[in-house]
Image (cartoon, helix red, strand yellow):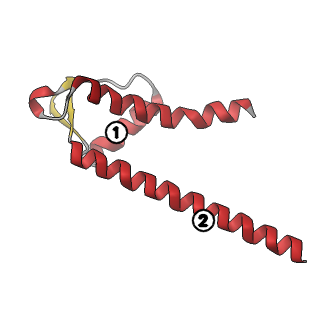
Amino acid sequence: MAQFSLFAALPPAARWRVRRAFEQAGAYSPEKAIAYEPPHWFEHRYFKRLREHGAVVEVQRGRYYADAPKLAEYVRKRRLRAFILASATILAAVMTAKRVLLH
């Protein structure tokens, strides 16, 4: 169980670390672009998605800045998808439990 908890905590921590790197550097414009290389697999995966959605923009090879409005929109949509998935999972569990208890 402890291994599952640790594994479940890795992606949110990775997302936080990627966003924090840009936040701490104030890298929200091409002039403030930073050199960034994701240190781990989870960060690399999230960073790649941010780039695909235009939330992180490469201005020169290896130098990036975060587009704040697009980043906020990406995070908002991701949280909404997570909420919908969690809600659907809970609803399915309740319906299954109800079916099991009534039969």
Q: Is residue 12 left or right of residue 48?
A: right
- In the image, residue 101 lies at what x, y percent? 88, 71
Q: In percent of the image, x 28 and y 24: which residue is there?
A: 24
Q: Earlier in the sequence, mark 1 or mark 2?
A: 1
Q: For the view shown, which residue lies furthest in the left direction?
A: 31
Badge 2 density bin: few <14, some 14–19, many ≥20, Cα 10 Å: few
Q: In percent of the image, x 31 and y 26: which residue is there?
A: 21
Which residue is label 1 attached to? 48
Q: Is residue 78 left or right of residue 30?
A: right
- In the image, residue 102 lies at what x, y percent? 88, 77
Which residue is label 2 attached to? 88
Q: Is residue 11 above or below residue 75?
A: above
Q: Is residue 6 left or right of residue 27?
A: right
- In the image, residue 45 lies at what x, y percent? 41, 37
Q: Which amino acid, mark 1?
A: Lys
Q: Quadrant of residue 61?
A: top left
- Asked which secondary structure carries label 1, the reply is helix
Badge 1 density bin: few <14, some 14–19, many ≥20, Cα 10 Å: some
Instruction: Find the distance from the CA under tag 1 to the CA under tag 2.
Output: 28 Å
Q: For the view shown, which residue lies furthest in the bottom direction?
A: 103
Q: Is residue 85 left or right of residue 45?
A: right
Q: In percent of the image, x 30 and y 52: which residue is there?
A: 73
Label at residue 83:
none
Q: Which amino acid, mark 2?
A: Ala
- Asked which secondary structure carries label 2, the reply is helix
- In the image, residue 82 lies at what x, y percent? 50, 54
Task: Give the position of the C terminus as an image quadrant.
Answer: bottom right
Q: Quadrant of residue 2?
A: top right
Q: Is residue 95 above or below residue 13?
A: below
